[in-house]
Amino acid sequence: MLINTTKETVDEIKKVIEANPEEGTCVRIFLAGMGCSGPAFGLALDEKGESDLYCESEGQGFLMEPEFHEQFGDFNLEFTDGGYLVTPVNAPEGYGGCEGCASGCN
């Protein structure tokens, strides 16, 4: 398991952890839902479970369930425009765009 991120992104994560210490010290990446442009991924503070995959990037611990990693692989994580952009390393070109939405994305 590999999470590509930056020190700046991890600094933002650490601010969230400091504000919510009871939630956990690791960041879990998970499937938040499916939309017309594909899967949407979420982040949550958590502690490592017995079966979790774990890695550190820029000094921050990250978690994933093994089945989730088998399906989606490694991830890129970036803090941008006040939020986190979570994308699979091997995402197809145009991933996350709105070209698949019949109603468009407003």
Image (tube, rainbow, N blue to C red):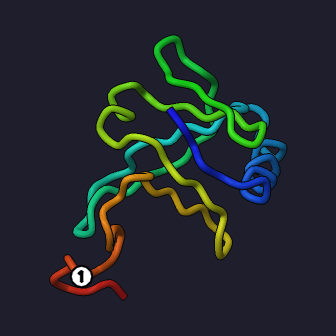
Q: Kindly identify the residue that appears in the image at 78 percent across and 53 percent down.
A: 7
User: Is 77 above or below relative to 101?
Assistant: above
Q: Nearer the viewer, residue 53 or 49?
A: 53
Q: Position of residue 50 (x, y in %)?
A: 52, 11
Image quadrant assignment for residue 85: bottom right
Q: Kindly identify the residue that appears in the image at 54 percent across and 17 percent down.
A: 49
Q: Kindly identify the residue that appears in the image at 24 percent across and 82 percent down.
A: 99
User: Is 24 above or below relative to 49?
Assistant: below
Image quadrant assignment for residue 83: bottom right
The C terminus lies in which quarter of the figure? bottom left
Number of dots carrying numbers: 1
Is residue 47 rendered to the left or right of residue 60?
Answer: left
Q: Nearer the viewer, residue 70 or 21?
A: 70
Q: Nearer the viewer, residue 37 or 71?
A: 71
Residue where numbered disc 1 is placed: 99
Is residue 69 rendered to the left or right of residue 4?
Answer: left
Is residue 33 rendered to the left or right of residue 45?
Answer: left
Q: Position of residue 88 (x, y in %)?
A: 42, 52
The residue furthest top is 50
Q: Kindly identify the residue that appears in the image at 31 percent across and 56 percent down.
A: 39
Secondary structure of the residue carrying numbered label 1: loop
Is residue 1 rendered to the left or right of residue 34?
Answer: right
Q: Position of residue 31 (x, y in %)?
A: 38, 45
- Say what amino acid the circle numbered 1 marks: Glu
User: Is 101 above or below relative to 64?
Assistant: below
The residue furthest left is 102
Q: Position of residue 14 (x, y in %)?
A: 80, 46
Image quadrant assignment for residue 94: bottom left
